[in-house]
Image (spheres, helix red, strand yellow):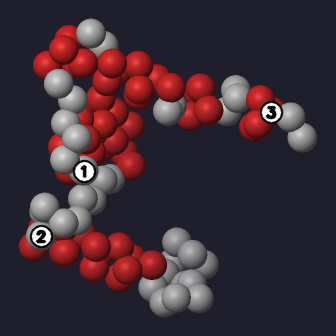
Amino acid sequence: LFCEGVSVYGPIWDHYLGYWKQSVMEPNRVLFFKYDETMVDPVNHAKMLAEFIRAPFTGEEESSGTVQEIVKLCSFENLKKLPVNTSW
């Protein structure tokens, strides 16, 4: 039902579309990531996010692999192995 647009808050696709339109009108205020695009190029999206929050990576951080390390630490593969997520 959810994928068909049925939810407590109304059609979810209309909700998403509102954010997409706002991100086009105000790119400095609304950052819209698409999951598939983010998964294809997570490093670039991490850089985009850092720039959006006005804390861009320095040249030294980029050249030393800091961005790649952050992406690795935040990956689903890494997060699912954390003790908090494996001990029930």
Quadrant of the image occupied by residue 88: top right
- Return the residue nearer the eye: 21 or 48: 48
Residue pointed to by mark 1: 53
Q: Amino acid at mark 1?
A: Ile
Label placed on residue 24: none
Quadrant of the image occupied by residue 68: top left
Q: Residue 14: horizontal and vertical position, in percent?
A: 35, 82
Q: Amino acid at mark 2?
A: Glu
Q: Which of the two labelled residues, at mark 1 and mark 2, occupies the earlier sequence position?
A: 2
Kindly identify the residue that appears in the image at 24 percent across and 69 percent down. 20
Residue 51 is at least partly visible in this image = yes
Kindly identify the residue that appears in the image at 86 percent across and 34 percent down. 87
Q: Which of the two labelled residues, at mark 3 and mark 2, occupies the earlier sequence position?
A: 2
Kindly identify the residue that appears in the image at 70 percent across and 26 percent down. 81
Quarter of the picture containing the N terminus is bottom right
Residue pointed to by mark 3: 86
Q: Residue 61: horizontal and vertical position, in percent?
A: 24, 18
Residue 48 is at least partly visible in this image = no
Dot 1 falls on a residue whose secondary structure is loop
Image-based side of 40 in relation to 4, left or right: left
Quadrant of the image occupied by residue 82: top right
Q: Residue 18: horizontal and vertical position, in percent?
A: 28, 79
Residue pointed to by mark 2: 26
Dot 3 falls on a residue whose secondary structure is helix
Q: Amino acid at mark 3?
A: Thr
